[in-house]
Amino acid sequence: MPGKKLSREKSREPENRPRPAAMGFVLPSPSALRSGARRLLKWYARNARDLPWRRTRDPYAIWVSEVMLQQTQVKTVIPYWERWMRAFPEVNGLARAKLERVLKLWEGLGYYRRARNLRAAAQKIVQEHEGKVPALFNEVLALPGVGRYTAGAICSIAFNQPTPVLDGNVRRVLTRCFGLRGDERRAVAHQGLWFLAEALVRQAAAAPGRRNCGNLNQALMELGALICVPGNPRCDACPLSLQCVARQGNRMEKFSPVGSRPTLLARRFAAFVLENEGRYLVRQRPVTGVNAGLWEFPNGEVKPDASRDCLVREVMGPGVLSLQPMMVLQHAITRYRITLEVFKVHPSRAPDAHRLADAARRATNGCWRSRQGLKRLPFTAAHGKIVARLLSADDRLRSAP
Ligand code: SF4
């Protein structure tokens, strides 16, 4: 590919934008970019998965799907998106909704800040844009929780604007196809990838057809998800194989984005389920920090030099003693791999059960909730599984002869 710069790109470039050579690749010629964009559009027209958010041009519905898809697989997102759109079919409803209801709908998706930001952005749209998602890129970018990727996705898919997107899948495709060398996490290489993504979507905008900008961006994402996968890319089925630098020399590894993940650190926690007259002791997490504002059963970290018996007294107060194992859960939060042992706990002296349970409520700063009440509260992912176990045990008891 000749190392010539696109004249139409050049005229839009800010003076301080890095030059392609400094970014670790030779800028593809306009004809290579044009044919790449057209191949991607053609491939997407034939191979795009039929996903529910692809059947609409509603910017709000597309925005919700893009936020849910961050860090989450498509098959997980589909039922969440459908449920969300039934509950909040338009921005005004989301803006008015109670935070607890919003978090409940998000329960299990993780990264709850996304749900909070969606609601905050909906409120801003109602206040500043009369309840309509703005079409200007900078106004979309100014919404809470919306970064360059999400703004680019909304503007290109809903409004057919040539705004690029760059997620992990797109990064991998571009790195391999255009032979980007070096660590793509470095700022200069990162800018180079945005530069390529923008050059491609601008070529798509100039090609005949409708909705080319959104389709081009979705084609890149889809290609990275289905064909140009991290381990063994399916180059035989790839529309870019004829021009792919990595494929030409079978050098996928050389041109693969650096993807080393940090090692997860192991931590152990114990959670305690205390029932008193058909109600359970639960508490709400602080309004800041991990899983802010969600609900959980009283719990604490099991330190290497402390026993669970000490921990239960520390968390629940001195009146609660006997522990009955209930389940063990494994999950990961940020850089931690967490083992959560769950115990049913019982007051030490049956005659004083009610008084001791109340002392536990004060010690944990918690409150009592019936089974129906538990169903309505948004729990952290792990503690939601405890609720599910309690409810299914309850169902089994009810259906027993
Ligand atoms: S030819 Fe292979 S390595 Fe190159 S972009 Fe396509 S799938 Fe990826």
Image (cartoon, rainbow, N blue to C red):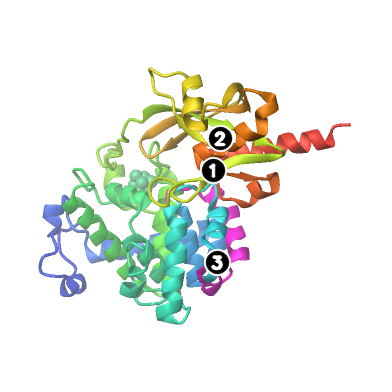
Question: Callout 1 environment at 10 Å: few (<14), some (14 to 19), or many (20+)?
Answer: many
Question: Whole-percent x and y of residue 132?
Answer: 47, 78
In depth, the one of 241 and 200 nearer the eye is 200
Check the image and report above or below for 261 versus 322: below
Disc 3 on helix, strand or loop?
A: loop
Name the residue that disc number 3 marks: 97
Residue drawn at (35%, 49%) of the image = 168
Question: Whole-percent x and y of residue 225?
Answer: 44, 48
Q: Please tell me the numbered disc located at residue 360.
A: 2
Question: Callout 3 environment at 10 Å: few (<14), some (14 to 19), or many (20+)?
Answer: some
Q: Are marks 1 and 3 in contact (CB under 8 Å)?
A: no
Check the image and report above or below for 21 versus 314: below
Check the image and report above or below for 183 versus 328: below
- Give the extent of the magenta segment: 70-95
Question: Whole-percent x and y of residue 52?
Answer: 58, 61
Mark 1–mark 2 distance (CA, rounded to whole Å): 8 Å
Q: Report the amino acid beneath label 2.
A: Ala
Residue drawn at (40%, 64%) of the image = 153
Q: Report the amino acid beneath label 1.
A: Gly
Residue 25 visible (yes or no)? no
Residue drawn at (42%, 68%) of the image = 121
Disc 1 on helix, strand or loop?
A: loop
Which residue appears farthest toward the bottom when viewing the image?
130
Q: Please tell me the numbered disc located at residue 366.
A: 1
Q: Report the amino acid beneath label 3.
A: Ala
Residue 66: name its quadrant: bottom left
